[in-house]
Image (cartoon, rainbow, N blue to C red):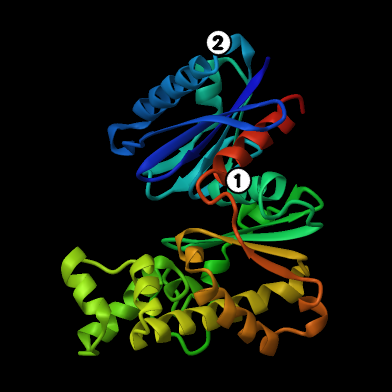
Amino acid sequence: MNYVIGFDIGGTNIVGGILNEKLELLQQKKISTEADKGLEHVMNSLTRVVDHLLQSVGAGRKELLAVGIGTPGLVDPVKGVVIFAGNLGWHNVPLAEKLQALLQVPVTIDNDVRMYGYGEKLKGAGQGAECMLAATLGTGIAATVIDKDAIFYGSGFMAGEMGHIPMPGESTTCVCGLTGCLETVASATGIERQVKEALDAGETSLLSELRQEHGRITAAMVSQAYDQGDALAVRVLTHTAHVLARGLSCVIPMISPDVIVLGGGVSLAGDRLFAPMREELSRLVYRGYLERLTIVPGQLIDTGGVIGSAALAYHKRSV
């Protein structure tokens, strides 16, 4: 039996998974990224995980067909180069070439959000969609469009940075240097910022106690306070949902998706976020688009990137 391995590389952790030729995920392995120890250290770690995963299914490298990698940042998937990944400290890294030399199998790399979306399209919430938009709502916001099973890259492979659509009425400076970007509100860090600013201004909230207890605020804590009727939590999640709807309203008429999949930690807020978002979209988007559109939470939030990167490597191995 032959296998393919996929990796989802993050600033903190690397997750690897081994799939069979039906693209069924069999085993996973998580390790620390430790990018600060240098590129060669990361390469050696990836190689060790490959061997571990193969051993876990009783196989060796001769049964390995290909390896796929999803990595943050700007990626050239044609050349196999990570052009820039700030949280890894990588600039113009020929990642595919280096790992292929170590493993002697085809290696494919791409952006991690594109790989998450690809996984959702093949095995998750996007199955059967003709045109799917997948977005991750995490530390920031990024998205990918998959139309008829083809990933849309745009010029310079820069398509999908939905988080940097400026939102009228928002004034927070974004890490990109612009003001009022979508991700300054509708991300995990955006939610935390909104709560912090309100608490620092003296607003009374259950979240004040949670911040004292844990030292910070998370999106999960805001959902917890929301369920207890906390006014600040309700206001923040509702405002976040409305701003997210405005961001999506800029995208929906351009691509006319039939499915939007929202992943990332913020999506776990569920209907606390989705219900007011859908209501706001009904006021912002022509109903002809909405009548053919389904917006759903991701099904593969923890595994989509691994599945997507492995699947893309499998499909491209003989190209």
Q: Quadrant of the C terminus?
A: top right
Position above or below: 87 against 243: above
Residue 187 in view (yes/no): yes
Q: Nearer the viewer, residue 227 or 90?
A: 227
**Dot 1 crowding, Cα within 10 Å, few <14, some 14–19, many 20+:** many
Residue 172 is left or right of residue 84, and the answer is left
In the image, residue 237 sits, relative to residue 56, either above or below, namely below
Q: CA distance from mark 1 to mark 2?
A: 25 Å
* Quadrant including the N terminus: top right
The dot on residue 115 is 1
Q: Mark 2 is on which residue type?
A: Gly
Classify residue 60 by image quadrant.
top right
Q: Residue at x 62, y 35 (%)?
A: 79
Q: Amino acid at mark 1?
A: Met
Asked if disc 1 and disc 2 are in contact, CB closer than 8 Å, the reply is: no
Residue 164, image x, y percentages: 52, 70
Q: x and y percent of residue 67 in the render? A: 59, 27
Label 2 residue SS: loop
Rendered residue at 54%/43% (across/down): 303
* Precedes in sequence: disc 1 or disc 2: 2
Which mark, residue 60?
2
Q: Residues within 10 Å of mark 2 (few under 14, many from 20)?
A: some
Q: Position of residue 203 (x, y in %)?
A: 24, 90
- Horizontal and vertical percent for residue 128? 79, 53
| Res 171 visible | no
Residue 91, picture quadrant? top left
The quarter of the picture where residue 43 lies is: top left
Q: Callout 1: helix, strand or loop? A: helix
Q: Nearest the camera: 105 or 91? A: 105
Q: Is residue 220 above or below residue 316?
A: below
